[in-house]
Image (cartoon, rainbow, N blue to C red):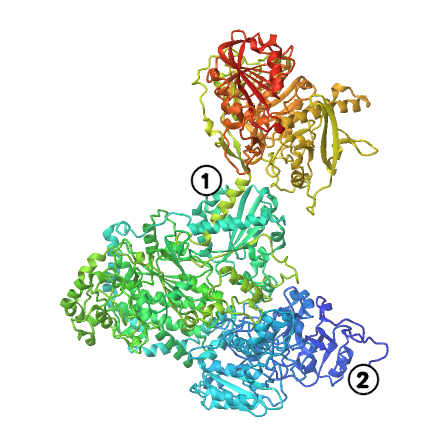
Amino acid sequence: MKPPPEGCCTTDGFCQAGKDLRLVSISNEHIEVPAGFLLVGAKSPNLPDHLLVCAVDKRFLPDDNGRNALLGFSGNCVGCGKKGFCYFTEFSNHINLKLTTQPKKQKHLKYYLVRNAQGALTKGSVICWKGAEFRGRQSSSSTCSSTLFQLPESSGLSGSTSSEPLPAANLSAPAGTQQTAAAIDHIPSTAAFSSAVYNGKESPKQQLVKNNLSAQTRPSVLGTLTNSGPPKKRHKGWSPESPSSTETWNLQLNLQAPNRIKNDGGSLSSLPHSALVGPASSPMVGSGEPVSVPDNLLKICKAKPVIFKGHGNFPYLCGNINDVIVSPLLYTCYRNSQSLSRAYEQYGASTIQPISEEMQLLLTVYYLVQLASDQVPLIEDLEQIFMRSWRESHLSEIRQYQQAIPQTFPQVPSQIAPVTSAQLPWLAGLAASSCNDSVHIIECSYSLAEGLSEMFKLLIEGKLIKTNYVVIICASRNRAIDSCIVITGKYQARVLSESMLTPSDYQKEVNYQLVTGKVETLGSFFSTLCPEGDIDLLLEKFYQENQGHISSSLSASVNKPTSLNGTGTAACTSYEIERHQIRPFQLAVAQKLLSHICSIADSSTQNLDLGSFEKIDFLICVPPSEVTYQQTLFHLWHSGILLELGLEKEHLTKQRVEQYVMKLDAEAQIKFKVFLQNSMQNPHTLFVLIHDHAHWDLMSAMHSLYPQTELSTGLVDRLLNCREVKEAPNIVTLHVTSFPYALQTQHTHISPYNEIHWPSSYSNGVDLYHENKKYFGLSEFIESTLSGHSIPLLRYDSSFEAMVMALGKRFPRLHSAVIRTFVLIQHYSAAMMAVCGLSQMKNYTSVETLEITQNLINSSRQCPSGHGLMVVLRIPCTPLAAVAYERLYNVRERLALEDNFEIILGNPNSGITIGKHFVEQLKAWQKIEDVDWRPQTYLELEGLPCILIFTGMDPQGESLPRSLRYCDLRLINSSSLVRTTLEQELGLAAYFVSSEIHTEKAVVNDVLESDPEKLSSTDNEDEEVATEGSTSEKRSPMKRERSRSHDSASSSLSSKASITAFCSESSPPLIAAGDTAKSSHQVISNSAEETTNNYERQKQKVDKGAQTTISKHLPPVTEQLDTKQNIKSAQISITSSSSSPFSSSSSSSAPTHNSFILQTSQCSMTKASKQPPIVFLPKLVYDIITSTDSSGLPKSSSLLPYHSVMWASSFRPLMSKMMTCTEQSLYYRQWTVPKPIHMDYNNRNEGRMDTFHPRRLLLSGPPQVCNKNKIGKTGAYLQFLSILSRMLIRLTEVDVYDEEEININIKEESDQYYHQPGDMWPDLETFKKMPFDYTIHDPKYEDASLICSKLQTINSEERSMSRRQEDMYTRRQTTRMRLSKYAAYNTYHHCEQCHQYMGFNPRYQLYESTLHAFAFSYSMLGEEIQLHFIIPKSKEHHFVFSQPGRQLESMRLPLVTDKSEDYIKSPTFTPTTGRHEHGLFNLYHAMDGASHLHVLVVKEYEMAIYKKYWPNHIMLVLPSIFNSAGVGAAHFLIKELSYHNLELERNRQEELGIKPQDIWPFIVISDDSCVMWNSVEFDCSGDRKSDYMWTERNVSLKQILQHIEATPNVTHYALIGMRKWSSKTNSAEIKEPFSCCHVHDFIMLNVDLTQNVQYNQNRFTCDDVDFNLRVHSAGLLICRFSHFSVMKKQIAVGGQRSFHIKSKVSDTPVSISPAQYICAPDSKHTFLAAPAQLLLEKYLQYHSHRFFPLSLKNYSHPVLSVDCYLNLGPQIAVCYVSSRPHSLNISSSGLTFSGLLLYLCDSFVVASFLKKFHFLKGATLCVICQDRNSLRQTVVRLELEDEWQFRLRDEFQTANAKEDRPLFFLTGRHI
């Protein structure tokens, strides 16, 4: 090559002028393109990853056929703008291609460049040089429908680009237009749509391509890459133009091949629908001469041969390449099978050899030989054969490696001698010799070219008519074998070629054939079949002749029962609308869903904070089917869920319901945007996004941007996978589907732990859910086909299939869907005519179609109300469905059947349209009075006799009614099935039947719908399953033997069956004018309920009446019926002499007119709803469904699961029959990967496990569309919403104590009110005048002793005992309350606002805290008290530390005069034990965010656990001596510490000039169960001052505390508290806003005023009552704000319950009664491991009557209790007096006491004090002291022996060991 000029740029990718030419760099720049020029991409050998942009005169480029390119070159440089390059050599130098060989435009100009939808320049189709190579451009004359895309008009292509959809006449027409191949070395273009793995690793170029994915115009090649190694190491002879993947067998590719494009698959062979038709140049192109494809090949052979490239080189094809199809799929399968051993590389050895090429080919021949003539090869089968063969040949090595011993094993030679290339042709020929020419072997000497030429020659000569497969082998000793396999069988070739079309191309092709009139030849052919001429003429003639008669006989008979009945509803009771109810398994599924939600919330990842949500909202996304949409609205409306969740009020309107269901159509984005906005605006609402029918439209949003895609595709990806949904913490996505396989790939968003599978109804034969309905799904349908079972529910129609196959050969250019549809329309038309009396038409329909039609037409006459059957006719292709609808509608009109049954076109894009007559019928049945009502769902068509033509490429979740009887799936696209598609179609017939019905049991003939003269040979097409124990007549089961074939008419006679009469099943005879042959209906009624129990009786009737009743209407052959024959033979003869296996051994009861009378009320719909529908399938699908693989699973299970996924490897195990749903999911997750068109394709994080979305769940359950009452998944997920809402409410609700105040009747009723109801604060002077109410009113002290305050005459009955002693632990009365925003929370509450308050930083690490010692001396304890504070760093500002040493000095206190809206002055202390999780210590919300000081008071042994749960809380740790103490000790220390701290703060702040009395003296002591606070608001606007209204509402604790702290003269009050909340509070209780009485639970304590009043540190119970009495007796003020109330949560753990009294000797828990808590001193009583004080208090509570017998229920003579209050039980009253001088005591004059209690009395109690009181004779005394010595001293000091008599046996002690310091008692009697 000439060297470049000096000084010019020589950088690769730039022109010599230095301008960038790389496509990635200039794709968005505007490029001037002269007229007549095109932009093309050139490849530089030095830049394999880039295309260089050039402008070339299109005259020098080839046309679509690879021809007509002018020699030479003319081009411009788009970089520098230089023009006029006339030689490609010169041009290649300018653009720096740096070639070492002669530059050729054919070699280096590779692609057309086009603008995509965003205007970016991107790689388009391949430039098709030469006739044998691929073509990518489309001409306006092209007739191909399977082209991937149209070049956009803006691309700069002028005349050669068609802007209209291409006509679709010829499926494989000009091959060039259908091949969009890329050169092998253009890996980036293919990798962009692949997850290609080369040698087990990702392509090194994929990353670049991922970035450019959106820039692709369309999926260009997407086929199988045919290189087996990395792309740079190309085989020397490989063609620069690699074929696309025209994969035509049943397998998606291995990961080593790039994925295929959108919508591929679905074919029987799961082929890419985008697979491209036409000749393919080989991946390994030889140097031989091209092979010419003969002209008129399609015309001569009646089919296009499909060539599968195998091993080695494949020659070029030229000539009539439109008539052949080439696919590399077999080559890919071979190559993948070569890499099987890589799965064992993990064991560290590479000794296992892959299966050889010779063995692969030989096994392929063996496989083809055993295929039947009506079978199509499946790649899955072949892969399993290879795998099995390989495993068997390497069994010993595999076993060694599977033991995983870490050593290298020596190679074990294979036991099977390898096949050599010389032996191969001979062995293959030997294998093929036994198959009757089905497989033909051609051996070549030099290249495949000669073999292909010979094959074409044999085809043209007609020598391969019997041959389905031609195997061409070129084997020589010197090199590897070359091979290919040609499919020449017409049926197989047609199926495989049609499987390459995408659904949209399939529709276009069919539409084109309809529009262009190509089907007219089919119509004219049908006309020639009818002996009377054109069917339409026959119909017209019939219509004219019978117009009057038909309307009066047939139609009238339909309406006759209805008219007799008047309304048409009363006579038939079968039309029951079941009430909405939740099924047991629906509830089980809902609970499983809830469990998974809770698991997400409970995990440590903080992905879902259920505690922060107050309510549920949801949006259900459904496919864009109007019927599905309306059906979901219907379910939603009737479920009541909207009202239950509080989303809507009563009087729900349809418009409101529509807000919660979104159809995934063009308008979805608007509704979804509103949903997202709502989720952002309502962070405390949990939004559940339900994606129903989730397997529909999993298209990647990126790929849906291509122009050929529909607008709605990719919507799921765009909406549900958008960033807002993924990141929103309050959106949970629930995918719901019956076919979850496409969501179970290696790149799925859904964690396997978040999958919920429908539960099995039975486990080991046990009914788990006691369900009265049994599910009938795919496995049950398959089971029904097994020999020995009942009627097969799956069937195929052999006569229909035979006619279709014959017509397929006759019309090779018509798509088989067109042929099948027209044949079926013909059959239905003929059947309707035959049923109406045109008996000659019986020969032009099949037995199956006649059965369906006959039962449909006659069904409405079996029911008095006219109920009938539904027939679903599934026609996926919409244009064909429209043709079928129009034709059948016309035939029905001509036959005057328009009032007999309806024909409905079920198009997913539109609603349901039915005639007015049928609307009125439905309204009458359903008792609907709305004039404008129209059915909007198929469920509402229940009972309507109709043919539903169900169209749309896929069902979209539409449910069908229970009256469905036949599901005709003969027209589903059998060449394009994957597992999802197949199961989805069969799911239409899924059904719930009554669980008593067992179809496996025998079946008796359903004569009601199988008349003796009926054409059907199906042995009672409508047999009713034997119902054991049902309410209908009992029928004895009969076993039937029948053939394994379920062809309904297997004999040659079936389609020519001789039938004279068609029965109307159970109508009275309608004898038309004319002879029998012309009679429109000769009715012989019969009954299904005539059972074998009546066999003998009916047999006699047959014997006597067979000839008179039957034979006169039978053909001569049946007139010879011997009257002595049994019913079986009668039925065989009657049913059209057909030898169908269904009629081979049928059982029937004989027809009599009497049977009609018995059966008039039998409704077809009733029977239909009691048994599953009968399903008719194409033979191909039937074979796949009913055949099993080696694991015992149906073969359909091993099909590719979904069209947009592919197998990760050929080396995969078979699925097991025993696999659970979970195991099946894990199988697919391991062995499938999404294609680039799948929305999960880019969800990859190599080597990481965080690709799962944490808030995404998958619910999978069987398809169950035949249900009226949400028996399936819809009901389950609506129930889930319900229980989730209830759980959230439960999380936001608490059980609070709700008890009336006690002892209200003892309360003084005073007319004097000291304050007005609306007063905000008490007046100090007024309050001082208020008497103290000694009586306890807190309901928790219902079991406590009454405190007497004066001479009371309380009747013993007045104090009614609500609880007996043994009921002490019964549940107190609670009510459930919704938490307000001002509630206190436990540790389970998390929300954004209080995260910091709780002490968790974003990394969820604990806050640091420090331990500080704090000591003070207290004389009463006789020692210094050592306390510890745990103070988090964030709370240190509340404390004062000494500067050197950081010693804790004091806790800061505010001033009385301080005022701040955001500050609470009083420190809050909460003593707690055993409630580290459940204690309500999170006061952030209760304080409304205000700054406050909160200290938890904990015992030393619980310090660590509390610190763990509450890392940001200050803790006061009690000394270890208090580990076993009660709440009294905590209260005591809190108060003493607070006073000591007050002194310290006064001293500290006095130095700052602040007066001691100005320091705030209050603290708050709060229980750990206070959850919410309320305030009463008064409305005193009434006329009289006494009139007022009041309401109570929840308020913040901040508001209450700040209100109390602002009380005038607040420091004069010693104790301030509030009411305990009760829903039963009445006006009288709060009329006086302030009370002087006991306060409990939540108090403000003035530590200054109460300096000399202490809590009793020994107390466990009633210490607050005891303290209140001490405070009052000290002359201090106790004020209760009655306007405020506190709600206390019921907490089942911790608190006082944490004290368990047990034996000190034995660890075994033995129940110890309170009577055993005391014993005599020095006795051998069992000592107890409990504090002495606790034993004392508990004993006195339950057994004080032993000490004070006179006091029992003697309320007018209470026990005198000095200086303390101890609970003596509810039946004893006490009178509290204080011995302190100047104390306030009640006047005891006139009071006579029944007992005296002296508890640890101090020096203030003296003998003279006690002598003031008077006692009853016989009154008892109880003295309690710390030890026996103190006891004696007290008796002496108080001179007790003067008035009291003591005995030695009256001394007791608590049941403690000596080291536990027991308390001692002494009792005595008053003298």
Circle 1 residue: 650
Percent coordinates x, y for residue 873 in the rendering? 39, 65
- 1519 over 937 or under it: above or below: above
Callout 1 touching callout 2 (CB < 8 Å)? no
Which quadrant of the structure image shows residue 834? Answer: bottom left
- 1663 over 962 or under it: above or below: above
Q: Which mark is residue 866?
A: none
Which is nearer the eye, 167 or 25?
A: 25
Residue visible at 57% across and 73% down in the picture: 398
Total marks shown come to: 2
Q: Please tell me whether mark 2 sits on a helix, a strand or a loop.
A: loop
Q: Amino acid at mark 1?
A: Glu
Percent coordinates x, y for residue 630 in the rendering? 45, 53
Circle 2 residue: 2
* Left or right, 605 with reference to 1223: right
Residue visible at 68% across and 46% down in the picture: 1404
Residue furthest to the bottom in view is 445
Percent coordinates x, y for residue 1506 in the rendering? 65, 38
In this rendering, does residue 220 appear at all?
no
Which is nearer the eye, 1027 or 962?
A: 1027
